[in-house]
Amino acid sequence: MLTPQRHIDYMGHSVETSDFIVDCLTAWWKQNQPDYPEISEWVIDLDGGVATRSDRTQFIKRMVELSQEIDVKIRLIYYPPYHSKYNPIERCWAVLENYWNGAILDSVEAAIQWAANMTWKGIAPIVHHIETIYEKGIKVLPTELEDYYPFWQRSETLPKWDITIVPS
């Protein structure tokens, strides 16, 4: 299993939406794909956040489109509610919160600078500021979503917590 040598964090200027998440994943892949030429599958750990829930129609649509665009199988593994202590990204956020504890974050630039200077497991992140303003509440109509479901395969044993997206 390959893991990035540096953590790349995306801090948004807008609300976190399905589009924000998928745009950040796309940007990460475009920047890092040459470092991973043999990757055929991503495995992404997720919490049950609103933007990435497995029943979120815009997230389903955008993730299927991403999988098809980059021709990579994407497996989404969801942590059940109240299991954040097992989620590595939650531990990273806890380190950041402790690091900037008491700091005056009076601007986006200050927050980005603090985040860029922290370390977690000896690694400093690369922080990108995304200035795009994302629209909330985008829904895909059921008739349009039907085209995406064949690529959105739920596990038979854990259908809510384990989803594989296959490129066409």
Image (tube, rainbow, N blue to C red):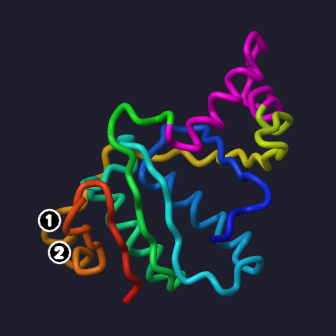
Look at the numbered discs 2 and 1 and tell me whether their residues touch, using CB distance below 8 Å: yes
The residue labelled by disc 1 is 142
Q: Which residue is situated farthest in the bottom direction here?
A: 168
Taking the image as shown, residue 94 lies to the left or right of residue 116, namely left
Q: In terms of secondary structure, where does tag 2 sit?
A: loop
The N terminus, quarter of image: bottom right
Position of residue 38 measured from the top left corner of the image (x, y, whole percent): 66, 86
Position of residue 27 measured from the top left corner of the image (x, y, whole percent): 64, 64
Q: Would you say residue 32 sits in the magenta stretch? A: no
Position of residue 159 measured from the top left corner of the image (x, y, whole percent): 22, 61
Residue shown at the point (44%, 82%) measured from the top left? 68
Image position of 24 with respect to 130: above or below: below
The residue labelled by disc 2 is 146
Closest to the observer, 89 or 128: 89
Q: Would you say residue 91 sits in the magenta stretch? A: yes
Span highlighted in magenta in the image: 86-114
Residue shown at the point (67%, 70%) measured from the top left? 2
The C terminus, quarter of image: bottom left
**Type of secondary structure dominating the magenta stretch:** helix
Residue shown at the point (41%, 62%) measured from the top left? 76
Closest to the observer, 95 or 16: 95
